[in-house]
Image: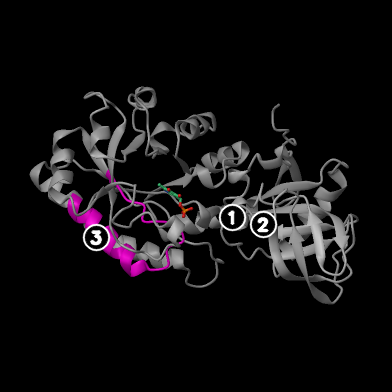
Amino acid sequence: MENRSSIDQALKSLLPQLSAEDTAAIVAHLPRLKERLEHLSASMPGMQHSIAIKTNPQTELLRTMVSLGYGLEAASIEEVRRAKNAGCPLDQIVFDSPVKTRLEIAEVAYDAGMLVNVNTISELERFPADATCVLGIRINPQVHAGSPEMFDVSKNESKFGVPISSHSELIQAALKFPVSALHIHSGSQMQNLEAQKEALIGLRDVALTINEQSPGKIHTLDIGGGLPTEAIEGQTKMSTYGLMVQEIFRGTSFKLVTEFGQWVHATAGFAISAIEYVVQPDRIFIHLGADFFMRDAYTSARPFPLAVISSQGRWRSGEARPFDIAGPLCFAGDYLAHKKNLPSDLQESDYLVIDETGANTYALWSRHCSRTVPSYWAWDGNSIVKWAERQTIGF
Ligand SMILES: Cc1ncc(COP(=O)(O)O)c(C=O)c1O
């Protein structure tokens, strides 16, 4: 693990506070979170950044981001309520669920300033004509921005948004209904910024066409999220993307909104688990499996940086050898990793330190085997505080 020094103090503060029942703990790394948010704002100045709640819905974490001036993107009515509960101003909340019920629409229709993106043209019919939310249409840009298959939402047959090829239908709907925003989200972990450029130009041109017919009708463009995580060093993918976005929208007066998740959160947190059993020659059992690492166990595992620390706070540094890291759930696929190099002097009751677990882990906690959700902590660079107790799944 290269970044060990940035979590060393956090761990030394955390370990003495754990009880015997705390077989695992989740930690938010606030200095990293702030660094990432600042880099996002510097790369895309003057835009509204509404961070995707689905990536990490921890209540205090949402409050922290809101207190720093960031908005929140909600994928469900429950997430809209979380955003409000976190104190997010209505005009910085984006509501994107593709299956909003009539009841949910009634709940948000008069939330003045909240951006509510419809997924289909027929959904527009469900909104009252005098709605005060900002009504947007999600467009499927029909590009392939290089997202992995499961997270690519811009294919022709995607369930998300009105295909950009339905150009005239789209424009007629925007003119007929009280629509004042357009939205795209091409997919997660986009690799191909050229394809995304095409998507953004398509979005801009649809908006300009609508405004030619009804000047000023479209005032907000939500360009989604989708960048993979990266280290903030030198020219980042985020800063390159920011320049591209500014270039595409230069000379226009649209309010631009983004919805990043993974890029903001992934490195801004880590987790630890006690090593409960060491089964020679090469398997360890830990307390975080497909319940916390759901996506990793069921798709392909992310390369989380790993290290081992004793319960007294001493890093194990024995010669590395490969171990399989098994989780606690009752199915054969419950492994965090296979053949991962770990220090050979690791022992039972040491902790496996798993870095960069801030995105799509806690958010996807699975009830499988009804295991307790670990306590959640926050490191601010000086001290560690407990944000949430262990949480038993209800009976
Ligand atoms: C509509 C929408 N916006 C934003 C995001 C966040 O994506 P990412 O974490 O790739 O930035 C997602 C992810 O699924 C999404 O569906």
- Pointer 1 residue: 298
Q: Which mark is residue 145?
A: none
Q: In this view, does 338 lie to the left or right of 198?
A: right
Residue in the picture at 32% in, 69% down: 194
Q: Position of residue 301 (x, y in %)?
A: 61, 62
- Pointer 3 residue: 201
Q: For the residue carrying disc 2, how many other residues have a C-alpha within 10 Å: few (<14), some (14-19), or many (20+)? A: few
Q: Which amino acid does label 2 sit on?
A: Gly
Q: In the rendered structure, are the residues bearing label 2 and label 3 in contact, judged by CB atoms less than 8 Å apart?
A: no
Q: Position of residue 96 (x, y in %)?
A: 39, 40
Q: Residue 333 carries which label?
A: 2
Residue 83's place in the image compared with 220, above or below, is above
Identify the image quadrant of the C terminus: top right
Q: In the rendered structure, are the residues bearing label 1 and label 3 in contact, judged by CB atoms less than 8 Å apart?
A: no
Which residues fall within the magenta stretch? 182-206
Q: Which amino acid does label 1 sit on?
A: Tyr
Q: For the residue carrying disc 3, how many other residues have a C-alpha within 10 Å: few (<14), some (14-19), or many (20+)? A: some
Q: In this view, does 299 lie to the left or right of 340?
A: left
Q: Which of 12 and 52 is in front in this view?
A: 52
Count of marks overlaid on the render: 3
Q: In the rendered structure, are the residues bearing label 1 and label 2 in contact, judged by CB atoms less than 8 Å apart?
A: yes
Q: In which quarter of the image is residue 377?
A: top right
Disc 3, SS = helix
Ranked by sequence position, the earlier of labels 1 and 2 is 1
Q: Is residue 345 left or right of residue 331?
A: right
Q: For the residue carrying disc 1, how many other residues have a C-alpha within 10 Å: few (<14), some (14-19), or many (20+)? A: few
Ranked by sequence position, the earlier of labels 2 and 3 is 3
Identify the image quadrant of the N terminus: bottom right
